[in-house]
């Protein structure tokens, strides 16, 4: 009787019999070597997965940057020679209420307009001073505080008096 050792169930790559294959359906979960069929397919799948992850991560931020649908653009800013230019320059990124609630001096409006122009606000340099005059005339510290329009309460949500 010879004392031969049995081959172990798992054979590492460095084993002399590394070409050993488990029989199909052996229950070992391995029916042979696993090969990547096509490196281009694998690369394309990786890029597609990465693109989906980036898009899903960016979606909440783009939703925050969007203005709500149905927001009135022109009607909210006060009438004046620069109302249309203010709508174009400011309301491209901001809601009108952001501007309406400001109470800044002319120097502060100058800094604010210059900063927004650096950040990409579309203001013609020839219109810069007139826009600053419009903003400082309508939204200066001596103007009354901004009082936003209140929405009516929904039916049933108000306390009833007895």
Image (cartoon, grey):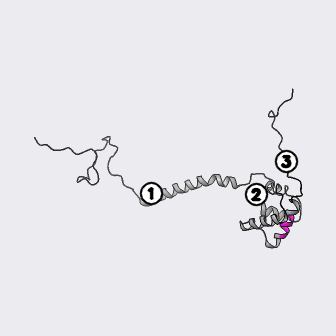
Q: Are marks 3 and 2 in contact (CB under 8 Å)?
A: no
Mark 1–mark 2 Cα distance, whole angstroms, equals 43 Å
What numbered label is drawn on residue 117? Answer: none
Q: Would residue 44 appear left or right of 113 to someone viewing this image?
A: left
Quarter-wise, where is residue 98 in the image?
bottom right
**Dot 3 surroundings within 10 Å: few (below 14), some, or many (20 or more)?**
few
Q: Residue at x 36, y 52 (%)?
A: 34
Coordinates of residue 7 in the picture (x, y in percent) = 22, 45
Q: Residue at x 79, y 52 (%)?
A: 71
For label 2, the residue is: 94
Q: Secondary structure at mark 1?
A: helix
- Mark 3 and mark 2 lie on one chain; the one further toward the N terminus is 2
Q: Identify the residue at the far top of this view.
A: 162
- Mark 1 and mark 2 lie on one chain; the one further toward the N terminus is 1
Quarter-wise, where is residue 125 in the image?
bottom right
Coordinates of residue 104 in the picture (x, y in percent) = 83, 60
What numbered label is drawn on residue 149? Answer: 3
Coordinates of residue 92 in the picture (x, y in percent) = 75, 60
Q: Is residue 131 magenta?
A: yes
Which quadrant of the figure contains the C terminus?
top right
Q: Reply above or below: 153 against 142.
A: above
Q: Would residue 125 appear left or right of 16 to someone viewing this image?
A: right
What numbered label is drawn on residue 42? Answer: 1
Coordinates of residue 25 in the picture (x, y in percent) = 31, 41
State which region is magenta: 129-134
64 or 133, which lies in front? 133
Q: Secondary structure at mark 3?
A: loop
Q: Secondary structure at mark 2?
A: loop
């Amino acid at each position: 009787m010879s004392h031969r050792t049995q081959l172990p169930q798992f054979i590492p790559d460095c084993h002399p019999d590394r070409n050993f294959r488990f029989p199909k359906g052996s229950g070992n979960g391995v029916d042979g070597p696993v090969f990547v069929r096509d490196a281009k397919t694998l690369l394309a799948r990786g890029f597609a997965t990465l693109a989906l992850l980036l898009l899903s991560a960016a979606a909440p931020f783009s939703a925050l940057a969007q203005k709500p649908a149905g927001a009135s653009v022109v009607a909210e800013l006060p009438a004046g020679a620069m109302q249309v230019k203010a709508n174009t320059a400011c309301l491209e990124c901001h809601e009108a209420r952001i501007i309406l609630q400001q109470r800044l001096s002319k120097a502060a409006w100058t800094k604010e307009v210059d900063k927004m122009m650096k950040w990409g606000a579309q203001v013609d340099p020839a219109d810069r001073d007139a826009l600053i005059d419009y903003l400082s005339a309508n939204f200066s510290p001596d103007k009354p505080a901004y009082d936003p329009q209140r929405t009516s309460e929904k039916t049933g949500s108000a306390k009833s008096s007895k």
